[in-house]
Amino acid sequence: MLRRGLLFLSNSRSARKVLTGTPVTRSMSRRFVPGERVDDVLEAARAANALGLKVTGNYLGEAVHSEAAARVAANTYVTLLQRIAAEGLDANASLKFTQMGQDISDQVLDDNLGRVLAAAKEGEIFLRFDMESSDYTGRTLEAFEKLWADGWRNIGVVLQSYLKRTPGDVRRMIELGARVRICKGAYAEPPDVAWQDPAKIRAAYIESMRWLMSDGVYPGIATHDDRIIEAARDFASREGISRSRFEFQMLYGVRRDLQRELVADGYNVRVYVPFGEKWYPYLMRRLAERPENVLFMAGSMVKESPLGFLWPDPPRRNPS
Ligand code: FDA
């Protein structure tokens, strides 16, 4: 019930107008989105690096339909990459093709992406292309392969274990030698293209993950699911795969306890840090994923402030 309400609020324009205007919602959002500006994500990155966490910065936004907005997104990434390089942070960037203007025209996409890729190359920073809904999977992978064929190597993709096509895509990325982030998948997809059963999605995830860990190039294991993380740890130790050959990835503000445990155990952990003006729908989706966070954040506003980073995560429900 609460989950549906939160998802409704994430899409409601009037709710957005009221809630984004209140300092309370803004303050709550800091748990998952450090701020709107490049300075905010850099500050979060410095703090994460100090804890031994790597970072990927993501300027929030997708399905951009105006050339001006796509240009702003590309400029923001250029600034982000230049600042990461100038400060020598242990950070890279994740972006979406539709944010660069994929839905507007190939020309707009190429111009914007070209500038971002040049900045990444200049700063020797890795760029990850997030995966969007299944309407875009084929186009995203084709665009990625085109860049690969053009000689770009500081780039990687994301594959989603809920998609039935993913084993074939994993095979292809292993053949190319491209870096893959494997995740479950975040969009509502129909049964003809995606598995619906959480147990099947997890099993498919573990299968692709093992394959990438043994034959792929430095895979990113993006999940907060304890059972998958345990499976990765077991597989690595059974197969003698060094901890330096893969990384775990989690969202900023989610399972901070686990992030630090893994770092303490010697694993690479990267935190996905979103920032930007589009924080409201992102926040509502994170709350909907785990509605207990609403109560948690309301309480933490009173208790958290200066020592917020010490506040433990709330008790978990069983991974489903
Ligand atoms: P699951 O949702 O089952 O969560 C497992 C457990 O984690 C929960 O039981 C709970 O304990 C904890 N948890 C999860 N969410 C929480 C929250 N908000 N607050 C507190 N605890 C929480 N998707 C996509 O389609 N394209 C992409 O490019 C990406 N990129 C991406 C990058 C990174 C770094 C991550 C971590 C995730 C993505 N995703 C994504 C999202 C991904 O597909 C998936 O929707 C989420 O990670 C949730 O799936 P889990 O594997 O975490 O399992």
Image: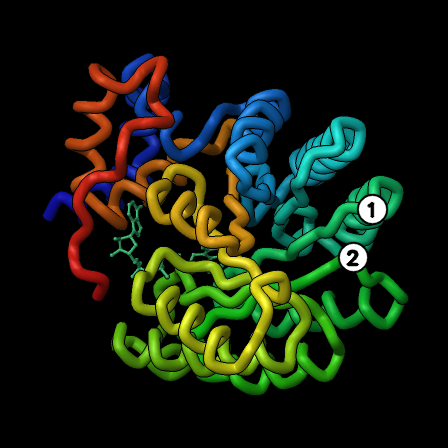
**262 or 173: nearer the viewer:** 262
As drawn, the label of residue 154 is 2
Q: State which quadrant residue 68 falls in.
A: top right
Going by the image, does 93 lie left or right of 308?
A: right
Res. 119 image quadrant: top right
* Amino acid type at image mark 2: Asn
Between residue 246 and residue 1, name the one nearer to us.
Answer: 246
> Residue 252: x and y, percent?
44, 39
Disc 2 secondary structure class = loop
Badge 2: how crowded within 10 Å, few (<14), some, or many (20+)? some
Q: Residue at x 39, y 77 (%)?
A: 194
Q: Which residue is mark 1?
A: 124
Q: Quadrant of residue 147?
A: bottom right
Q: Is residue 124 left or right of residue 73?
A: right
Distance CA(mark 1)–CA(mark 2): 8 Å
* Amino acid type of the residue tagged 1 in the rendering: Glu
Say if 24 sits above or below 317 in the image: above
Residue 55 percent location from the top left of the image: 58, 42
> For this rendering, which residue is in front, 237 or 182?
237
Callout count: 2
Q: Earlier in the sequence, mark 1 or mark 2?
A: 1
- Local packing at callout 1 (Cα closer than 10 Å; few below 14, some 14-19, many 20+) is some
Q: Residue at x 33, y 61 (%)?
A: 225
Q: Residue at x 75, y 33 (%)?
A: 88
Which quadrant contains ligand 1? Answer: bottom left
Asked whether residue 275 appears in the rendered view, the answer is no
- In the rendered structure, the answer to whether residue 12 lies left or right of residue 77 reads left
Residue in the picture at 33% in, 27% down:
310
Q: Are marks 1 and 2 in contact (CB under 8 Å)?
A: yes
**Image quarter in which the C terminus is found:** bottom left
Q: Is residue 242 left or right of residue 284?
A: right
Q: Is residue 244 above or below residue 162?
A: above
